[in-house]
């Protein structure tokens, strides 16, 4: 039996001297306790050394994938020419199948073969002669590094550490530049305070100070390459009537040196931004297309690396940078934040305030996909980023238009035609009144009762009291606006009446009672003068 062993330095083929021990023994490791025992079990038949690390990496990669490499084919061809009848023990079943198909060699793969490979690996330095231990260790280390780079798809062009450092430095430069500009404006403002209000650009302000110096030099200094003509003329006019104090030459030299520092830092910041833009397009092009260079670099810096950002879900990408607000909201049981660093993306900034949460959620989902594609894809392309950005812009337009899908005139609508089935409701004025509505009566009853009321008002019936004719007392109904009470029935008084008048009264009383029960009359309030007139009429009638 022959044994194929793959080492970092090359391919080795050993011949088993006593196959019976391997087949019969359950504890094969006892035969490999020492190097002498291993040498008595195996003998080196052939060895093919790798020429360089590239060949070793290609051979190892092919062995991992279960394929035959060129160095292995050369070794096996020599083996077939000499010992074609021997069986070959291999460590990988896929590799053994490939060798059997292409080289017509019978391959063996079993647990005993695995124990045999473990024993060979323990005493590889003594079994392979002619290679120093230092060289084999260096070959193993180089192959390990090369294989790690290949597995992780590592490329020196894709170093996200540079992006993390560049965006951190850019933020520090912005802070320092802001402090320098504030100090320069305040310092030079003691000498020429009016120029700070006219020249609002920080870089132009520093260049004016550097070129002009004292305000008395404004008339003879040409500032056309820095400022527009109108502002230049205004600066020269203000220099003649300035209210600033006089300063010494030493003071203006220090102010000029500070202005030079501002100009240099501004130039370096622009150079650093260009560098960061190029690195982002090389490392994460799809993420850069979606959110921009600065926001994408800040997301990578916050996560630690591009691979760490690719491991985050879309919900985490959405709120990266708002961790304090998130935990504060969870602690106080309030609404959680809808966005973090992704808020500064152009797509979120273009949307309305009510749609910013939706847009940030959709953008975070697309960013999570883009980051994974950038970090783990074999070939980098920007098709995915451009396609996702077009979809997001289309969705943003639909949200701005109210979320309605507009159909063109020529398009056909699938399904039944839509008809408006909404009921038109009119305003019911009867609901304004809190009083209960009166019962409905027929039109004939209402007209007859109305005619009778008019005749009764015009010709009131008369009663005979003590031999004199008098008007009957009018019946009053109490008014209660909130809770209407039923009118109380009055007892009939037994009086002597004339025959004609009693018959008229008996016909009118039922109708009057019906009207009082259904329709309320407004009580008539009598004045004191009316009461006096009634008393006088009673006295005259009694006389």
Image (tube, rainbow, N blue to C red):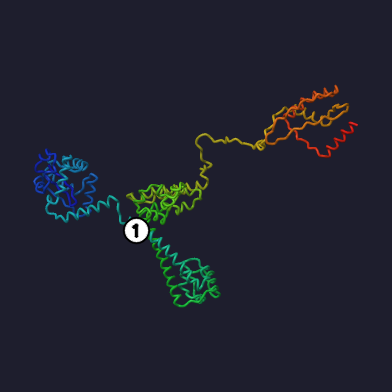
Between 348 and 457, which is closer to the camera in this rendering?
457
User: Does the rendering let one see residue 142?
Assistant: yes
| Number of numbered discs | 1
Q: Quadrant for the C terminus, please.
A: top right
> Is residue 484 found left or right of 198 in the rendered image?
right
Q: Please state the horizontal and vertical placement of residue 321, each as a whole percent of the image.
A: 41, 53
Q: Position of residue 161 (x, y in %)?
A: 34, 57
Residue carrying label 1: 162
The correct choice, above or below, for 57 with respect to 237 in the image is: above
Res 290 visible: no
Q: In the figure, is residue 212 to the left or right of 48?
A: right
Above or below for 303 versus 236: above
Residue 95, x across and y down, in percent: 21, 43
SS class, disc 1: helix
Q: Is residue 187 left or right of residue 158?
A: right
Q: 242 left or right of 265?
A: right
Residue occupying the far bottom of the picture: 249
Could you say where residue 254 lies in the image, as x and y percent from the top left? 43, 74
Is the residue marked by circle 1 packed among few (<14), some (14-19), or many (20+) residues within 10 Å? some
Q: In the figure, 210 relative to 408: above or below?
A: below
Rendered-image quadrant of the N terminus: top left
Residue under the image location 50 percent in, 36 percent down: 414
The image shows residue 94, relative to residue 202, as above or below, that is: above
For image coordinates 42% across by 72% down, the residue present is 257
Please report the residue visible at 84 percent of the width from the left and 28 percent of the height from the top: 461
């Amino acid at each position: 039996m022959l044994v194929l062993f793959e080492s970092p330095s090359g391919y080795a083929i050993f011949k088993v001297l006593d196959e019976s021990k391997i087949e019969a023994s359950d504890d094969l490791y006892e035969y490999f306790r020492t190097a002498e025992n291993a040498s008595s079990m195996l003998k080196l038949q052939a060895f093919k050394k790798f020429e360089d690390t590239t060949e070793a990496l290609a051979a190892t990669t092919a062995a991992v994938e279960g394929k035959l490499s060129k160095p292995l084919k050369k070794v096996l061809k020599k083996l077939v020419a000499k010992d074609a009848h021997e069986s070959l023990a291999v460590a990988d079943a896929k590799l053994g199948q490939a060798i059997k198909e292409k080289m017509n060699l019978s391959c063996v793969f079993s647990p005993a073969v695995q124990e045999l490979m473990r024993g060979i690996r323990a005493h590889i330095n003594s079994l392979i002669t002619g290679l120093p231990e230092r060289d084999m260790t260096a070959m193993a280390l180089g192959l390990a590094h090369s294989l790690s780079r290949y597995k992780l798809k590592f490329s020196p062009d894709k170093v996200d550490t540079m992006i993390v450092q560049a965006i951190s430095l850019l933020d520090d430069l912005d802070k320092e530049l802001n402090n320098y500009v504030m100090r320069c404006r305040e310092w030079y403002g003691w000498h020429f305070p009016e120029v700070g209000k006219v020249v609002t650009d920080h870089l132009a302000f520093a260049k004016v100070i550097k070129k002009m110096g004292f305000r008395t030099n404004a008339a003879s200094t040409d500032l056309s390459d820095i400022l527009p003509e109108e502002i230049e003329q205004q600066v020269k006019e203000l220099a003649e009537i300035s209210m600033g104090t006089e300063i010494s030459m030493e003071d203006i030299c220090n102010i000029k040196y500070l202005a030079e520092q501002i100009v240099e830092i501004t130039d370096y910041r622009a150079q650093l931004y260009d560098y960061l833009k190029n690195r982002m397009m090389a490392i994460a092009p799809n993420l850069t297309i979606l959110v921009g260079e600065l926001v994408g670099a800040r997301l990578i810096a916050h996560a630690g690396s591009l691979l760490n950002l690719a491991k985050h879900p879309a919900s985490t990408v959405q709120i990266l940078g708002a961790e304090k607000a998130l935990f504060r909201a969870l602690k106080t049981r309030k609404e959680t934040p809808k966005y973090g660093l992704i808020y500064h993306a152009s797509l979120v900034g273009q949307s309305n305030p009510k749609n910013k949460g939706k847009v940030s959620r959709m953008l975070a989902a697309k960013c999570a996909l883009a980051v994974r594609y950038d970090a783990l894809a074999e070939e980098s392309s920007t098709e995915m980023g451009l396609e996702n950005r077009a979809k997001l812009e289309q969705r943003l337009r639909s949200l701005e238009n109210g979320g309605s899908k507009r159909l063109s005139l020529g398009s056909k609508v699938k399904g039944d035609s839509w008809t408006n089935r909404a009921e038109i409701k009119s305003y019911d004025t009867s609901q304004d009144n809190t009083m209960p509505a009166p019962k409905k009566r027929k039109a004939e009853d209402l007209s007859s009762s109305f005619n009778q009321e008019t005749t009764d008002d015009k010709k009131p019936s008369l009663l005979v009291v003590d031999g004199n004719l008098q008007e009957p007392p009018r019946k009053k109904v109490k008014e209660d606006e909130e809770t209407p009470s039923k009118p109380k029935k009055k007892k009939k008084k037994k009086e002597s009446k004339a025959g004609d008048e009693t018959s008229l009264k008996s016909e009118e009383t039922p109708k009057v009672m019906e009207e009082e029960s259904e329709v309320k009359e407004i009580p008539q309030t009598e004045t004191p003068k009316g009461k006096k007139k009634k008393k006088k009429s009673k006295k005259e009638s009694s006389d």
